[in-house]
């Protein structure tokens, strides 16, 4: 019974595909997977917008949307209709072709990145030998779309926003990949399925997830900070910065193109959270052996919603960083910390299991954290600001 | 097989031609990114996953961005008034012919493979990593040294100027 429930979507797809003639079967199978993926994550996007607005409303001591449907639950539908019916305004001086292509170049790679994430047992759209590499490769193309949007609008604010966004994305991609490499090194594989399977098993009630080791905890925290910066989420939302550069690179977009940018950002956030779950939180594995009867995809999406809640909470709590603080955090703290973490993961891999391994790795991680954080605190002392050009 | 190959070839060549012939430098850089993407597609079609993904990660993700930044920070993206075809086109033709001759001679000198369907090579990324860390470790170290030197050079160039002494400013 649990087995059928666990594999119900896989079996359903196989059953549907078996109706097609033989030579069409691979194409039909791929189309079904892609349709399910897009449908699921587009609905999750709609759900997340309402959760985010409600959550931020709660944190800011107001109601949030409550007019459309019961408790405002139909607000995403109203937002979608509004975006569809709004006039699509393109600035007269804008570069028409590049301006049109930019939102597409953002959304397509975001959905492509989802393809390698295992969302349940046997439930990844493609299982590539280099799955994690594929994820980072398609993720890197979003930088180009941000530049295209910012440059083609012929607007100072949008170009400023694009420059900020690209500088931020390039800087935080380094700790993001280095944090992911520690988990890849332990699993010994770039395939997302193998990485999940390498975290299976329990000691008593405690699962063998990577996050429950010294290097895994440090790696997970580094990964999530870098993920927030990569998806331009608060406190790293300088590229949008409503109060200073209005909305950054998508200031000149209206109607459905604006909605596409919104969609692309949220799908990117889901994708990078999904990779964090795969690498550190045990993917679709249950957190305790007696909870194993709950289907695997439920666990994946429960973890995903948990991380989304974390992102919303952080957005409602932390103020925006300044540009120099942003760069300082990336290069002076997160880069050395992720390099140390890589070394600790190597030590963990090469030493025999036992208490000494735990103590040695924990001391290394905590010691380097204290050392680097002290250094940051001393560098961050407020001094008189020197302007090069403005005086 | 052949249809996707010709499609990717067309995409790559169109991107490369557009990168040479468009007037706006940013458009050229973006077309170059398209050509890089087409090349990555050809690698993937040849079952070279690592090369394909690395091509996207490095060329589309980093090199194209670098070119775009360089264009924006130097001469501006406005189209120049001079003609796009250089008057010394024969020099370029000579260089291109030379490069083509070198590659062609290398291809012609290589051992011919038997025609017909070959079994796809089963190179997994793990093997690539093993080879890089054992047999090709020296080239890897040399490359690392070169990149470190380039990085230090870039930092030195970009170092903050000394703040002007009070008095002689303004």
Image: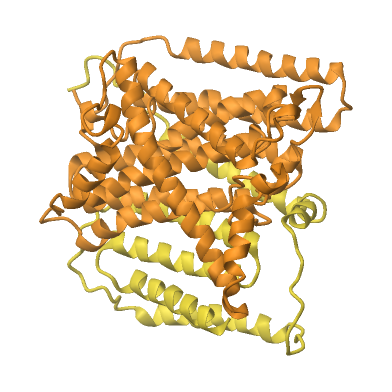
How far across and how far down the image is residue A387, in percent?
Answer: 26, 22
Residue nearer the viewer, B29 or A267: A267
The residue under the point 87% across, 25% down is: A353
A385 in relation to A298, above or below: above
Determine whether, in the image, residue A279 is placed left or right of residue A28.
right
Rendered image quadrant of residue A51: top left
Determine whether, in the image, residue A110 is placed left or right of residue B103.
left
The residue under the point 41% across, 65% down is: B34
Determine whether, in the image, residue B123 is placed left or right of residue B47.
right
The image quadrant where one finds the N terminus of chain B is bottom right
Q: Which chain is yellow?
A: B
Residue nearer the viewer, B135 or A148: A148
The residue under the point 73% across, 40% down is: A185
How far across and how far down the image is residue A96, in percent?
Answer: 20, 61
Q: Is residue B19 visible?
A: yes
Q: Is residue A110 visible?
A: no
The residue under the point 46% across, 82% down is: B94
Identify the colour of chain A in the image: orange
The image quadrant where one finds the C terminus of chain B is top left
A129 in relation to A297, above or below: below
B26 in relation to A142, above or below: below
How far across and how far down the image is residue B5, in percent?
Answer: 53, 79
Residue nearer the viewer, A296 or A87: A296
């Amino acid at each position: 019974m649990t087995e059928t429930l666990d594999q119900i979507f896989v079996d359903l797809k196989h059953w549907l595909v078996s109706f097609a003639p033989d030579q069409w079967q691979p194409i039909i199978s791929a189309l079904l997977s892609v349709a399910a993926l897009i449908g699921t994550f587009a609905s999750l996007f709609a759900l997340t917008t309402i959760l985010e607005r409600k959550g931020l409303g709660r944190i800011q001591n107001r109601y949030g949307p409550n007019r459309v449907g019961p408790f405002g639950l139909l607000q995403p539908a109203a937002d979608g209709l509004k975006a569809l019916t709004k006039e699509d305004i393109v600035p007269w001086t804008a570069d028409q072709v590049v301006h049109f292509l930019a939102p597409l170049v953002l959304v397509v790679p975001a959905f492509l990145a989802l393809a390698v994430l295992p969302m349940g047992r046997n439930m990844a759209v493609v299982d590539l030998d280099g799955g994690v590499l594929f994820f980072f490769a398609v993720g890197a193309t979003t930088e180009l779309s941000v530049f295209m949007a910012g440059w083609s609008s012929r607007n100072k604010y949008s170009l400023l926003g694009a420059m900020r966004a690209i500088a931020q994305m390039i800087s935080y991609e380094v700790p993001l990949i280095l944090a992911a490499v520690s988990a890849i090194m332990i699993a010994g594989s770039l395939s997302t399925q193998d990485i999940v399977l390498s975290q299976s098993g329990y000691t008593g009630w405690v699962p063998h997830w990577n996050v429950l080791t010294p290097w895994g905890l440090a790696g997970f925290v580094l990964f999530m900070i870098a993920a927030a910066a990569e998806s331009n989420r608060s406190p790293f939302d300088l590229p949008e910065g409503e109060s200073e550069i209005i909305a950054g690179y998508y200031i000149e977009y209206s109607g459905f193109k604006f909605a596409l940018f919104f969609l692309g950002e949220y799908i990117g956030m889901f994708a990078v959270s999904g990779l964090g779950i795969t690498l550190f939180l045990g993917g679709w594995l249950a957190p305790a052996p007696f909870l194993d009867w709950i289907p695997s995809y439920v666990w994946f999406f429960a973890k995903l919603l948990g991380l989304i809640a974390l992102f919303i909470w952080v957005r409602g709590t932390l103020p925006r960083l300044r540009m120099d603080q942003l760069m300082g955090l990336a290069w002076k703290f997160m880069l050395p910390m992720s390099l140390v973490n890589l070394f600790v993961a190597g030590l963990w891999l090469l030493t025999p299991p036992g208490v000494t391994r735990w103590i040695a790795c924990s001391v290394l991680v905590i010691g380097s954290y204290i050392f680097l954080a002290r250094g940051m605190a001393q560098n961050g002392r407020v001094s008189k600001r020197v302007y090069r050009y403005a005086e | 097989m052949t249809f996707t190959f010709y499609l990717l070839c067309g995409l790559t060549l169109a991107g490369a031609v557009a990168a040479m012939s468009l007037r706006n430098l940013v458009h050229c850089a973006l077309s170059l990114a398209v050509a890089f993407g087409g090349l990555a597609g050809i690698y993937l079609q040849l079952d070279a996953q690592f090369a394909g993904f690395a091509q996207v990660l490095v060329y589309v993700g980093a090199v194209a961005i670098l070119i775009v930044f360089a264009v924006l920070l130097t001469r501006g993206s406005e189209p120049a008034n001079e003609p796009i075809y250089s008057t010394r086109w024969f020099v370029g033709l000579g260089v291109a012919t030379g490069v083509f001759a070198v590659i062609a001679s290398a291809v012609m000198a290589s051992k011919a493979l038997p025609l017909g369907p070959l079994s796809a090579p089963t190179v997994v990324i793990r093997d690539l990593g093993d080879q890089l860390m054992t047999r090709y470790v020296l080239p890897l170290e040399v490359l690392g040294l070169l990149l470190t030197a380039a990085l230090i050079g870039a930092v030195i160039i970009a170092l903050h100027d000394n703040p002007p002494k009070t008095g002689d400013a303004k």
